[in-house]
Amino acid sequence: MMSRIALPLRSLRSIRAFSTTRPSLAANALVFLETKGDSLVPAALNAITAAKKLGGKVTGVVVAKDQDAVKGAVERASTMGLDALLLRTSPALEHALAEPTAPVLAALVKSGNYTHLAGPHSALGKNVFPRVAGLLEVQQVGRSSSGCLSIGDWLSAAPLDRHSPKTREPLTEDLDPSPQISDVMSISAEDTFTRPVYAGNAISTVKSHDAIKVFTVRASTWEPAQEGQGSTEVDVKEAEEVGPQQAQWISEELTVSSRPDLASAKAIVSGGRGTKSKDQFDATIVPLADALGAAIGASRAAVDSGYADNSLQVGQTGKVVAPELYVAVGISGAIQHLAGMKDSKTIVAINKDADAPIFQVADIGLVADLFEAVPELTKKIEAAK
């Protein structure tokens, strides 16, 4: 397999960080356990693993309108080997909207003297965590939709180094002024984290000097916490300092599918613009996914062309995945798409263009007409069952 190439990096001026540190204490982490209905979202389990990497005490917190609403989620969380488990309830927390939820988490961090607050790098996490950081008067660590940084962000963390995500070779000439501790991929110390930059083509090591570290976790780079590690007693109380309900929950429309969830599937078959139409996307991608028992994904080009639903988009502006098997069909391999799937364990690419960038990251590549190759591959997989 060819090496993945890191983008050229501009030399950046070293910035002196203004420290707000306090004497070093043992890590005491609070993990926001995101729920969906009565279940924990899969990424919450990855966030638990990341928090345990800090080496100190790990407490989980679930927020809900009442105890019955998340009974299953709390029962499962209690088996994850947490040192403590909190459940905070209020009618305003029914849908975990950012405005009422953020003050609850901030109050818990203060009252519990937590040194870290961790959670999934999900839509909810990216909405709630910057607000929590603002209430705690520490760096804003959640990535905004625009990707902009405030002056305070630039001054509150010490840049260390960058390295190629494939070769792991340090790129130490360029210092990272970005203090964001969002989308964390690894933790080397209580104050030192790595996160992707430049659409994942380089990895930035960031050191935070804030007294409280607030960070989100990239689920695909952390193993999920395992059940069966004893039973943790649940501390159930009414939530304190619930924020104002400045937004109103109207409705939610969910796409129901019998397929594996795209974000946590072990195998994914993704189609691109090379499938040429929605009908041909369905005729080629769906049977192959059925044969493999895989989830279905799509490139942004396929989604924008109407071949697949937006919920299936894989890439920088879609879902970031790292399955055991990723099959890219008719996908050229734009950098934005590669950012969402190049950590997959085995990448198979099928494309008639031998110079397509997708082959640079593929473990197995097939230069062929997808309309001939994919049906034949599907038949052979079915015959081998």
Image (cartoon, helix red, strand yellow):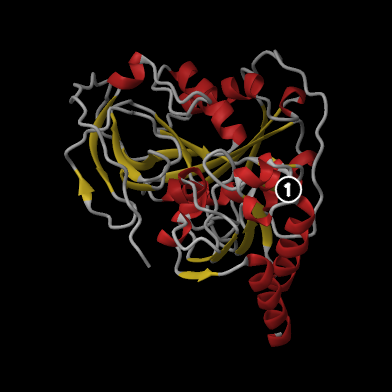
Percent from the top left, x then y, of residue 280? Answer: 75, 58
Q: Is residue 262 visible?
A: no
Q: Amino acid at mark 1?
A: Tyr
- Location of residue 303 (image quadrant): top right
Foreground pick, 96 / 229 = 96
Task: From the viewer's perspective, tell me whether residue 306 is left or right of residue 57.
Answer: right
Q: Name the residue beneath numbered marker 1.
A: 307
**Is 71 located above or below residue 98 in the figure?**
below
**Is 59 located above or below residue 240 in the figure?**
below
Residue at 64% over, 62% down: 269
Task: From the viewer's perspective, tell me whether residue 187 is left or right of residue 140.
Answer: left
Foreground pick, 357 / 269 = 357
Quarter of the image containing the C terminus? bottom right
Foreground pick, 165 / 193 = 165
- Location of residue 231 (image quadrant): bottom right
Quarter of the image containing the N terminus? bottom left
Task: From the viewer's perspective, tell me whether residue 227 is left or right of residue 94.
Answer: left
Percent from the top left, x then y, of residue 22? Answer: 27, 25
Helix, strand or loop at label 1? It is loop
Percent from the top left, x then y, of residue 373? Answer: 64, 72
Q: Is residue 342 visible?
A: yes
Percent from the top left, x then y, of residue 91? Answer: 77, 25
- Location of residue 27 (image quadrant): top left
